[in-house]
Amino acid sequence: MSESASFPERSLAVRRAAARLCGRLGWAPLHEVTLPNFRRADILALCPDGALVCIEVKSGARDFLADTKWPEYRNFSDAFYFAVDGDFPRGLLPEEAGLIVACDGAAEVLREAPWHRLPPARRRALLHRFAHLAALRLAALEDPVGVADLRAALRAE
């Protein structure tokens, strides 16, 4: 990644590369998912076996050092990864998280995340949230005016 790229540009490039990696792994990535604890996962990916993987994108060392909330994602995923670009100082990242490194539009898992299976009730609730959000986003793509009308009607109630 270019040293001159802004933090938002770096973050977007890493997120796109991580989502492409999810696809190659057979995982279904969903961006910007609000979790029950009101934290927002950059990517929540659904694996073929029903496991949920949380991927936290970091645009640089400053972004990571300013973030003290990342441990709160663990209770809402079976595995937790950081996704960073090739210039990120990897020594900053905790060993208890997986590591995905993005470079030139592609990404690779450099360190597998430890798995800690979610309790069944929490898994069911998260799968429902995932499906509901994905369906709403698909509906918005197919009928943006209809979804906007529905949102306006719901706000008016």
Image (spheres, grey):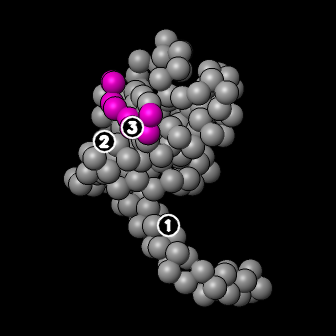
Q: Is residue 74 visible?
A: no
- The CA distance from mark 2 to mark 1 is 22 Å
Membership of 48 in magenta stretch: no
Q: CA distance from mark 2 to mark 3?
A: 28 Å
* Residue designated by label 3: 106
Residue 51 image label: none
Q: Going by the image, does 54 lie left or right of 46?
A: right
Above or below: residue 8 compared with residue 51:
above
Q: Left or right: where does residue 105 sit relative to residue 148?
A: left
Q: Which mark is residue 117?
A: 2
Find residue 120 and report its image quarter: bottom left
Most extreme residue toward the left is 49
Q: Amino acid at mark 1?
A: Leu
SS label for mark 3: strand
Q: Amino acid at mark 3?
A: Ala
Report the number of discs: 3
| Dot placed on the residue nearer the N-terminal end, 2 or 1 | 2
- Name which of mark 1 and mark 3 comes first in the sequence: 3
As drawn, the residue found furthest toward the top would be: 91
Q: Which residues are magenta?
A: 104-111
Q: Residue at x 53, y 46 (%)?
A: 41
Residue 157 picture location, percent across and down: 74, 86
Q: Please give the residue where the numbered disc 1 appears in the rendered image.
A: 133
Label 1 SS: helix
Horizontal and vertical percent position of residue 111: 33, 24
Say which of marks 1 and 3 sits in front. Answer: 3
